[in-house]
Image: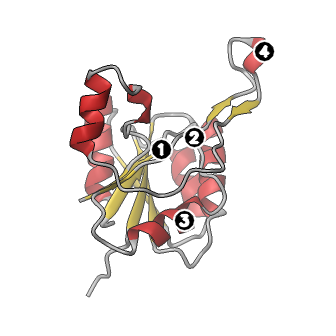
Amino acid sequence: MVIMPLLSVVVPTLDRPDTLRHALATMACQPADVDCEFIVQNNGGNPEIAEMVEGLKDARFKHFASDTVLTMTDNWESALGHAAGEYATFIGDDDGLMPYACATATDILAGGAIDLLSWRAYSYYWPNYYHPAFRNRLLAEIDFTSSVKRVSSRRELARVFAFQAHYAYLPMMRSPACAG
C-alpha cells in the first residue's frame, strides 16, 4: 500500500539549472520528517537537471522528464499529474521556500476540512535583475498581527469585484496549496 503524502511541492522547469539549483536547496532544507514530496518536471529532459535532482539523494524528490519540449501548459499539467499529495502547490524554478514553510503548511493542513491554503508571497530579485536598485533584494510584507483564518471565497471575490480588496490577496497559481 502506497501512502499518499499530505503536500506535493511541484516545480516545472525548462533549461534553467542555474536558478533551479537554489530552489532545490531551499526544498532540501525543509525538515526531513515533514509529510511532503517534491516533484521536479524537467521539460525537455535536460540531463544536468536530472543529475542535480539525483545528486540530492533524498527520497522526497521525484524527477520526471519529457522527451521533447512541451508547451508551458502541458509541462505544468504533466508536473501536477505526477503529484501524489492530498494538497499541491507550485513554485517556479527561480523561486524558493522559506525555512519551515512545508512544516508550517502541513501542520495547518493536517487538521483537515481545508480546501485551500494561501499566503502572501515574498519577492526576491536575482543579482542579474534588469534594474540595479532591486538586484539581490528580498521584499517581504510582514504583518506580525496576522494569523490563520478561514475566508469565504465567495465573499472575498465579491469584495475584489467591488474594488473593496486587491486581487493580490486572492490565492494565485503559484502560492496556494489546493486539495486534489
Q: Which numbered disc covers residue 11? A: none
Residue tagged by mark 4?
Answer: 133
Q: CA distance from mark 4 to mark 2?
A: 20 Å
| Amino acid at circle 1 | Ile
Q: Is residue 146 above or below residue 54?
A: above
Q: Secondary structure at mark 2?
A: loop
Element type at marker 1?
loop
Give the secondary structure at mark 4. Answer: helix
Which residue position holds label 3? 104
Q: Nearer the viewer, mark 1 or mark 4?
A: 4
Instruction: Give the numbered dot on residue 91.
Output: 1
155 lies left or right of 26: left
- Check if mark 4's residue and mark 2's residue have beta carbons within 8 Å: no
Q: Nearer the viewer, mark 4 or mark 2?
A: 4
Disc 1 to disc 4, how far (Cα)? 25 Å
Q: Residues within 10 Å of mark 1 (few under 14, many from 20)?
A: some
> Can you identify the residue that label 2 sits on?
95
* First reached walking from the N terminus: tag 4 or tag 2: 2
Residue 107, position as x, y percentages in the image: 48, 71
Whole-number angstrom distance, CA of label 1 to CA of label 2: 6 Å
